[in-house]
Each structure stands twice: as C-alpha cells, then as structure tokens.
Image (cartoon, coloured by chain):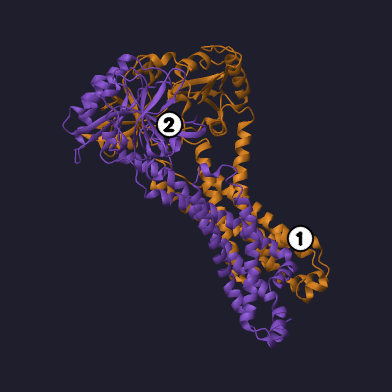
C-alpha cells in the first residue's frame, strides 16, 4: 500500500514538491509559535518568589561604575534615606536595591564554579530587602547586623541558583571567589526569585549585601518602599519632598512596581502575541491554499480515479488513497522539518527555552500539522470518493 | 494588447471565486504585514516634524571607549561633546542636550508622569517646532540658567486644563520651579531627538560634575548647510578623535564614535558599536533577509495555487498555442494576470494596514506615536505587491508556456 502511494506521489513530484515545501515551512512556523506560547504558558503560574503589590520604587540618578566604591558621603546619605523613609507610619519596610524586579536593568554574568559554567544574575541589596519584597527564607538566614563584621561579602542565593551551583549539597557557609580581593560567602537560600515576574525564565538570582558601615558591597540606586495597603497617593509627594531634603543634588522619581510590572509584561508579551497572530494567519492561508490545490488535483485526476472505481475500488478505498497521499506528503515535510529543528539545541536553543517546552512544542506542532493536512484533504477526497465510475471515465 | 490581457485577467478571476479568494487572502495578509512594518520603520527614520530638517543633520548618540580590559559603550558626556564636537568647521549649528528620561512631578496634589529634556538654545534652530503659544528659550536663557521651560500641549492640558493659556505659569519638577515660555504640539516617543514633554535649559541641570565627563547622558546634533558637507564634517570629527586623551593609554585603547544619521544611529545600536563593517548596509541586509524569510511561505503557497490554476486552463493554452501564440506572449499574459491579482491584494492590504495602524496608534502602545500610511508607504506597498506578483507568477507561467500544444489540448500534461 505505502509502496504504491510512494509511486503515485513520485509520479507527480513537481506539483507535490511545492506542497511539501509549504508544509515544511508551516511546520517550522507552528513549532516556533507553539514553543513560545508553551514556554510562556508554563512559566505563568509558577510562584514569583516576590510580592510586587504596594511597593514603590524611588530611583535615584547617580551612577557608580562596577567595582568602584561609592563616595562615603553618598553612602551615608542613602542609608539616611532608608531610615527616614521607615520613620513614616505609612511605610512597612524600606531597602535599597541596584537592579530591582521589573526594572529592565540586569546585572548578569557567567562564571565557572566547581567545574561548571553557571549564569547568574546579581542584585546588591540592604537588609530590609527581604521584608520589602516579602521573600521566604528556606535555608540558613537573611542578612542581618551579625554580618557587619564579616570578612567575606555575605550573599543569599535564590533556590534555583543554589541548585545550579551546588546541586543537592548544602550551600550554607560555602565560599565563591568574586575577584582577587573579595570572597563571597553564602548565608542563606530564599525561594526562586523571578526578577521579570510571570515572564521570567530561570534567573539564578544572587543577592549581595550592602553593608551599612560601607565596609563592603556596592551601593544601589533604587530605594524600594513597601507601603501599607490603601496608602493615599498624597503620601508619595510627602515622601518625595522629605527625600529631596536629604540629597538636594540628586534627581529621582517614584514609580509604582505595579506599573513597572504591567510595562514589563506588555514589552515581553507584545512580540509573542503579534507573532502568534501573524503565524495563525499564515497557517490559515496555507490551509486554504492546500485545500484548493488538492481539490484541483482531484479534479484533474478524475480519469485515474474513475479507472480505479471501474476496476472495483470502493468509495472508502479511494478516500483512503487520497488521504494517504496527503499524509505521505506531510510526513516527508515533517521529517525534513524535524531535521532542521533538531539542530536548534546544538545552536544553543536551550538557553532560551527549557527542554520540556521544546519537546512539547515539537510534539504539538507535529500533531497540528498532521491534523491540518488531513483536514485539508477531507473535502477533496470526499469529492473523489463520490465520483461515479461511468461519469469519471466519460470525463475528458 | 494590454487591455486584452486585463480583460482576460478579470474574467479568469471571476471564474473560480474560491481560488481567487484564497490567493487574495494570502496576498493581502502578506502585504498588510509588510506595510505595517514599513510604516513603523518609516515613522522612526524619515525626516518628520519636528525633525524635518534631519536630511542635513548628523548626531553623536553613542560613543565607545575601549581598553585592554573591556570598555564602555554609552551616550557621550558633556565634556566629550564640548571638547570634540563643538565648533566643527562645516557646522551651521551645533546643539547639545540630555536624553529625555521619565520623571515624576506633583502638581496640585496630582502625580504627573512625564519626560524632561535639558537643551541649549541651538536645539530650537535645528529642530522645527510649530509653537502653539510663545516661543523657545534662547541661548542667553541657557547661559544664565534661567528657569524657563517649553512644554507640549498634552502637558499643558494635564497641568492647567484643556486649552488654558500656559504662558507665564509655573510648575515644579525635580525640585526646581520653571516658568512656561512656549507650548508645542506633542511629539511621538519614537523621535529620538525631538521627543520630550518638557524642555528646560541645559545649565539648570543639578550639580556640575557632568561638565567634565566623557561618558554620560548627553547627545549632540550638528546641522550642515547641505548633505554635501557630511563627508567634510565626518572627516574633521574623525581627525579630532585621533587626539582623544585616554585615562590609561595603551596600544589597545581606542575610541569609537561617529556623526550618524538616524538610520546609521539605529544600525550602530543594533549591529554593535565595535563592529568595523558598513553597519547601515548590514542592517539593511538583515531587514531584507527577515522580509524575504517572511515572504517565502506566502510565495510558495501562491505559486502552487497558480500552478494548479493554469493546469485547469490547459485547453485554453492549447488553443492559443495551436494558433501560433509565442511562449513569450503567454508568459507575459500570465505574469500580467498575477500582477493584477497582487495589485488588487495590495490595495486591500493598504486598507487593512491603515486600519491596523490606527488601532496601534489609538491604543497608544507607543506614546504619542501616530502611525499613518502616506503616499510614500503606498508607493513602497505597490512596489512590494508588483515584486510579489512577478516572483510568484514567473515559475507557473514558464511551466505553462512549455506545455506541448497536443498535451494541452488533451487536458494538461500528466
């Protein structure tokens, strides 16, 4: 049966080649769109490891280059801003961070630890940060005054970072070399922290402590303030005015983290949605085109089909033949497409999508493309199976 | 002859409506997507108000200072511009200004989110604003650090109410009180130099550290008398950069900067400042490659539909061939039919693109950006349609013209 179908398909290879090319490209488009949708879909419901409601971000306009120590006066002024902010009854917690959640600024680096290359994201924070973002400590402890005297730079790892660096081993107390002069020492592990919120993939966050006595740590330029729910918007102006008095030379602005989150989601999801819409239209166009071409080819092969009917093939037999041919064409296209897609992991696709999203995307695309091509063949093959042998043979 | 082709073309299109619909659907979709993309690109790079003189303006938007252990790519600092950009011989006007970062202000117990750009007096000569009220501040205002500001009509509405005259009124931003001296229409955020909501004199900036820095948050634009002066300007700037003073000079130290048009600036941004090739050309190639990749699937689809449509018309072709029509005239006829189809599709796509762009503009995904299709976009669109029509028509036409008359008369080659 299959051998026979192959022969039939081969004899019309030029027309079929075009169909195969079409299905091939559609398969690639489907795979891309579905994988993107699935990887965003699976990320969406995972816990964030942070709470963005009622957090305000006061970003200050000063730049400190990497590795450079902040001016001691500025360092002191920033810590005065934290305590000043906390003195308001509307404020539940306040802390400084360098690259807060939803802020589009990221400090990222790949380093070799225990013989493995690990990509980590960093943030420099003060002790109140865990309270502001309402993070849960699952091992060890968060930063505290006991770290003031530490000879190493204390760090807290997010659970995914701890797993990436140490696997199942206990990370507490472990040391990592930062540079020639500084050692990092792990004091605690918090729940996986997803910096960009719902659209974040694996971040591997590492939090470095900013010491109040300026002994170590790099000053951050964002003051994060958690206010009590239902704080009136007026308070924002009061807070801004007070902070302005402390550092009159620095420009700053207040943003709600809720707004920053909306902005982040919109920026990250718009291309996916636009791509999805265009992809859906492309697939619809191909489906219509395929139906047309198959319909046309059935009309053209009236004589051949008539002959088969006259020689005793039943309607369902003919039906199966046409659908079999379509499925065969789809198979050729899918095999070629799979060869292309399977190269992607070698090119580093797993840095962008997880292997599971990749696999599920591949399988869904495969199923969809078969369903679609068979669906396109249904009407033409039904037409073919209805042909009366006598009519078919007379047609010329 | 041509009229005959057109007549046949319309007859054919009307004969098999399902096929015509499929073809048109594909063509419309493809061209509409390309037109929307073109309109958005055009909106960012074309010389549009208030950047309408930008066909003779070059800018320094990003510089890179690299040494043996890496380096920095960032907007230039004020010190850099003062030292290496001020006073180029062929410049008619030179302006320095900050970026337009988001700012927050409190006005009448209201929180207002806005953007503030600090500029000098020359900015208002190079850019072409139509003032609704008052006028720009001057270079003297800048030198004396007068607290005066120009705002947009949108800002005026948020501060003082709709169409309330704003001249002489004041507001506080960044802890400084400014007096309004001019009001201009709102500018889309996609205009790299023209965009802001509030403009204030450069010298009102806080602190004075910025005046010395090489790296910072400043941009410069230089207006030439005409485009012909661009090479001379660029030569002089490159000449000055050879004398750049590095903090820690070493053989690997280099500074990379250039006087760019808006498109060149985008190319520098996307392709990378350290890449030494012709960046604008590379960006064009990348854009073209993306467009071609996108167009592949619709083209294959259209070719295969066209191919099956001709086979249906085998007997017509047979008759024409038997009566002595040359292959060339058959190819001409078929390509013509296809171009007619794609041009119709192009016209529909134009309508669809207008509609989609109005949705994008109204939703304000990009603040104040009004995406419109204009005569130029329409021209691009029709060119695209014709190109698409020819590409997807040539192969089927060639197949058709090669058909043997006898086979054709019998109903097509098997």
Camera-nearest label, 2 or 1: 1
**Colour of the chain lettered A:** purple
Q: Mark 2 or 1 closer to N-term?
A: 2
In what element is the residue under mark 1?
helix
Quadrant location of the N terminus of chain B in the rendered image: bottom right
- Residue A15 x, y percent position in the rendering: 71, 65
Circles 2 and 1, Cβ within 8 Å, touching? The answer is no
Q: Nearer the viewer, residue B117 or A369?
A: A369
Residue B129: give its label: 2
- Residue A196 x, y percent position in the rendering: 39, 40
Mark 1 residue crowding within 10 angstroms, few (<14) / some (14–19) / many (20+): some
- Give the letter of the orange chain: B
- Marks 2 and 1, how far apart in space? 55 Å
Q: Nearer the viewer, residue A164 or A192?
A: A164
Residue A275: give its label: none
- Residue B184 x, y percent position in the rendering: 37, 33
Provide the residue designation for mark 1: B398
Within the image, what quadrant is residue A389 found in?
Answer: bottom right
Q: Is residue B7 left or right of residue B131?
A: right
Within the image, what quadrant is residue B133 found in?
Answer: top left
Compared to residue A78, the image places residue B299 above or below, namely below
Is any part of residue B301 visible from this angle? yes
Q: Nearer the viewer, residue A178 or A163?
A: A163
Q: Is residue B367 left or right of residue A325?
A: left
In what element is the residue under mark 2?
loop
Chain hosting mark 2: B
Within the image, what quadrant is residue B409 found in?
Answer: bottom right
Chain hosting mark 1: B
- Residue B353 x, y percent position in the rendering: 50, 52
Mark 2 residue crowding within 10 angstroms, few (<14) / some (14–19) / many (20+): some
């Amino acid at each position: 049966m299959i051998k026979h179908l192959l022969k039939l398909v081969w004899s019309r290879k030029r027309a079929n080649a075009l169909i195969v090319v079409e299905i091939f490209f559609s398969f690639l488009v489907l795979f891309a769109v579905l994988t993107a949708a699935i990887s965003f879909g699976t990320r969406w419901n995972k816990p964030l490891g942070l709470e963005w409601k009622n957090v305000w971000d006061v970003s200050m306009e000063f730049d400190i280059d990497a590795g450079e120590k902040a001016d001691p006066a500025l360092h002191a002024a920033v810590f005065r801003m934290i305590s000043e902010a906390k003195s308001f009854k509307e404020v539940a917690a306040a802390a400084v961070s360098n690259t807060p959640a939803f802020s589009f600024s990221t400090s990222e680096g790949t380093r070799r630890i225990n013989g493995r290359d690990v990509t980590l994201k960093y943030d420099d924070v003060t002790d109140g940060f865990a309270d502001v973002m309402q993070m849960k400590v699952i091992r060890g402890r968060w930063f505290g005054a006991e770290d003031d005297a530490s000879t190493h730079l204390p760090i807290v790892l997010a659970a995914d970072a701890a797993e990436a660096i140490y696997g199942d081993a206990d990370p507490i107390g472990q040391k990592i070399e930062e540079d020639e002069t500084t050692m990092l020492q792990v004091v605690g592990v918090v729940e996986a922290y997803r910096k960009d919120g719902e659209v974040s993939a694996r971040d591997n966050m590492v939090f470095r402590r900013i010491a109040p006595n300026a002994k170590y740590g790099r000053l951050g330029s964002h003051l994060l303030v958690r206010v009590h729910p239902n704080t009136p918007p007026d308070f924002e102006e009061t807070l801004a005015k007070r902070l302005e008095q402390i550092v009159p030379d620095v420009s700053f602005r207040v943003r709600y983290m809720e707004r920053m989150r909306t902005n982040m989601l919109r920026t990250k999801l718009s291309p996916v949605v636009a791509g999805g819409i265009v992809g859906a239209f492309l697939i619809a166009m191909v489906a219509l085109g395929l139906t047309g071409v198959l319909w046309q080819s059935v009309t053209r092969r009236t004589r051949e089909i008539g002959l088969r009917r006259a020689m005793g093939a039943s309607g369902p037999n003919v039906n199966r033949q046409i659908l079999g041919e379509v499925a065969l064409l789809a198979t050729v296209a899918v095999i070629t497409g799979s060869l292309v897609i399977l190269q992607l992991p070698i090119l580093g696709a797993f840095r962008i999508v997880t292997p599971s999203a990749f696999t599920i995307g591949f399988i869904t695309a495969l199923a969809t493309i078969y369903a679609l091509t068979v669906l396109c063949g249904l009407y033409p093959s039904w037409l073919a199976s209805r042909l009366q042998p006598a009519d078919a043979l007379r047609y010329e | 002859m041509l009229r005959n082709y057109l007549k046949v073309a319309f007859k054919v299109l009307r004969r098999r409506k399902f096929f015509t619909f499929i073809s048109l659907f594909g063509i419309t979709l493809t061209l509409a997507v390309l037109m929307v993309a073109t309109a958005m690109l055009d909106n960012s790079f074309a010389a549009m108000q208030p950047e309408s003189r930008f066909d003779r303006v070059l800018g320094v938007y990003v510089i890179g200072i690299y040494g043996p252990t890496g380096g920095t790519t960032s907007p230039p600092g004020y010190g850099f511009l003062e030292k290496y950009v001020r006073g180029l011989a062929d410049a008619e006007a030179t302006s320095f200004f900050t970026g337009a970062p988001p700012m927050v202000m409190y006005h009448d117990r209201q929180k207002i989110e806005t953007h503030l750009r600090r500029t000098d007096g020359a900015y208002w000569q190079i850019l072409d604003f139509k003032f609704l009220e008052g006028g720009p501040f001057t270079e003297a205002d800048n030198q004396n650090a007068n607290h005066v500001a120009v705002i947009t009509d949108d800002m005026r509405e948020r501060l003082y109410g709709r169409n309330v005259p704003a001249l002489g009124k004041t507001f506080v931003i960044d802890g400084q009180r400014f007096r309004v001296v001019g009001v201009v229409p709102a500018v889309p955020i996609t205009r790299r130099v023209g965009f802001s909501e509030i403009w204030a004199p450069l010298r009102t900036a806080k602190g004075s550290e910025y005046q010395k820095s090489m790296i910072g948050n400043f941009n410069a634009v230089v207006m030439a008398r005409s485009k012909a002066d661009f090479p001379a300007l660029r030569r002089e700037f490159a000449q000055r950069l050879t004398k750049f003073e590095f903090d820690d000079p070493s053989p690997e130290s280099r500074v990379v900067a250039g006087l760019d048009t808006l498109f060149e600036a985008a190319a520098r941004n996307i392709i990378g400042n350290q890449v030494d090739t012709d960046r604008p050309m590379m960006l064009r190639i990348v854009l073209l490659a993306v467009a071609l990749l996108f167009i592949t699937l619709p083209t294959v689809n259209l070719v295969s539909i066209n191919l099956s449509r001709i086979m249906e018309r085998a007997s017509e072709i047979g008759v024409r061939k038997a009566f002595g029509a040359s292959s060339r005239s058959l190819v001409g006829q078929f390509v013509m039919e296809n171009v007619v189809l794609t041009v119709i599709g192009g016209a529909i796509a134009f309508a669809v693109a207008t509609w989609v762009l109005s949705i994008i503009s109204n939703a304000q995904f990009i603040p104040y950006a009004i995406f419109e299709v204009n005569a130029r976009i329409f021209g691009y669109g029709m060119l695209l349609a014709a190109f698409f029509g020819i590409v997807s028509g040539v192969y089927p036409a060639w197949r058709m013209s090669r058909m043997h008359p006898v086979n054709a008369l019998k109903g097509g080659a098997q």
